[in-house]
Amino acid sequence: MENLIHLWENTGLFQITIGQVVMIIIGMLLLYLAINKNFEPLLLVPIGFGGVLANIPGAGLADPGGILYQFYTIGIESGAFPLIIFMGVGAMTDFGPLLANPKTLFLGAAAQFGIFATLMGAVLLSTFGVFDFSLADAAAIGIIGGADGPTSIYVASKLAPDLLGAIAVASYSYMALVPLIQPPIMRALTTQSERTIKMVQQRHVSQREKIVFPLLLLLLVAFLLPDAAPLLGMFCFGNLMKECAVVDRLSNTTQNSLINTVTIFLGLAVGSKLSAESFLDFTTLGILLLGMVAFSIGTASGVLMAKLLNKFGGGGINPLIGSAGVSAVPMAARVSNKLGLEADPHNFLLMHAMGPNVAGVIGSAVAAGIMINYVSGGG
Amino acid sequence: MEASSLLNEGLTLMLYGMGFVFIFLTLLVFVTTLMSKLVNQYEKSVGVLPADGVPSPTAVIPKHGPVKPSLKEPDNMLSILSAAVQEYRQRHK
């Protein structure tokens, strides 16, 4: 009899808490969204499954010693996984459109306003006592507005590890929702005639320029903002491997097998942060809301900046590509292209929008560097 | 008191951050434009790199790979010439 009771006390049914039930359901919901709705499946499948695993009662997969905990410590706490992913992203990025029209870097800069506006929003909410965010928390939440998964995870792991689960889920969900969130904002801020502005064919960018650019960017980072060097350094390294074309084997590995391997473990490790105690909290709701605001402001400021450039920079820029300044590559650029085609079926904006899109990646990495620098150094 | 200092910090970080992002990317615009000009100037005199990169991989250097017949070696020269002669004869019978 005693043995039976012992066995019963060790079952999941006996030990499970309401919180764990809810979190398992949330994990399943993420899996549903990924599998059935195709929302960022490459990340949401591992994250959702990791979330379910982390909440199995009694198994303690996410507790110290558990396997998910190990993945988290090795990969995310150390900052390694997001950086390796960034290297892969670098190896997949083509800076050609950006080099053909460097002015689009301004659009990538403007879209980062979303990050800082949200930081302000989070700080204001704390001031009024709605939430209790520190400056570091606020900075980590703001970076969701950069719409850049690895950057968000990197910053959150440095500044606000407690909020990492919610921040990662928010930032990947919004990246998947780009095609729903952006178009209404873009339509509201542009007129029909602006949407039909034709952009001239881009000039040809030579291979040498593409090889020199990552080195140039690296030097600029090294001189001005060493705190962004981990992110942008790996990014430039990946890109150089691709463009120099003499290490195709390395470049292929980085773009494919390596980034895929790391994505699996990154997803599971993020999932391990979806434990009931830390996720089922009023703050998570706040993070989801603020993330959405961040994203919308980023989109809007990108579009407005494009209109400004048009006024003072001689014109010829379709404001629709401004929204691509948020760095969700390449979804944001595709959205610009789609809206452009809607306004004028012969207007292909995709390549033009890739410029601000990769500029957005650089911009949000710079913003991340500044935040880490300010919060951990000065503040 | 503490709340207002948080507000101040946030405001400072926002201005400082946004300012820096713009300064950085503006600099990048200038440097990139300059770089493109220089590279294009340079390429006018040397020609462009092939898009598929410089030949021969660096990672593995095949030691006993297929060796291209070179005209400098007399043996190769002979076999190439005899092949050509044979080809010629077959066509013009």
Image (cartoon, coloured by chain):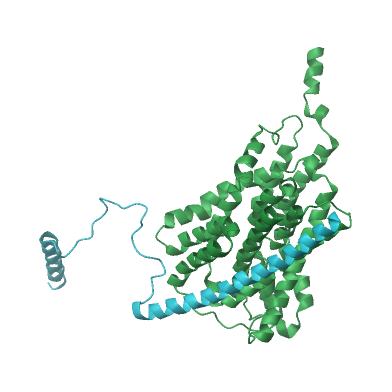
Chain colours: A green, B cyan
Q: Is residue A320 left or right of residue B54?
A: right
Q: Quick one: A282 or A20, which is closer to the camera?
A: A282
From what the image shows, is residue A243 above or below residue A169? below
Q: Is A64 or A222 nearer to us in this picture?
A: A222
- Identify the residue at image location x=89%, y=54%: A129
Name the residue nearer the viewer: A271 or A144: A144
Judge from the rendering whether residue A353 lies leftward or rightward of residue B56; answer left or right: right
Q: Could you say where residue A101 lies in the image, as x and y percent from the top left?
A: 56, 77
Up/down of A192 relative to B20, above or below: below
- Total numbered circles: 0
- The quadrant the C terminus of chain A occupies is bottom right
- Please tell me in which quadrant of the rendered image residue A27 appears: top right
Q: Is residue B77 visible?
A: yes
Q: Position of residue A260 (x, y in %)?
A: 57, 50
How far across and down, in percent of the image, does residue B61 sit?
Answer: 31, 53
Q: Residue at x 66, y 54 (%)?
A: A377
Answer whether residue A324 is visible to the viewer in this image: no
Identify whether A252 is placed above or below A101.
above
For the N terminus of chain A, give its image quadrant: top right
Residue at the top extreme of this rendering = A1
Q: Residue at x 70, y 73 (%)?
A: A302
Which picture quadrant has residue A151? bottom right
- Furthest toward the bottom, the residue is A314
Instruction: Report the front residue among B50 and B24.
Output: B24
The percent position of residue A285, horizontal first and vertical second, equals: 83, 52
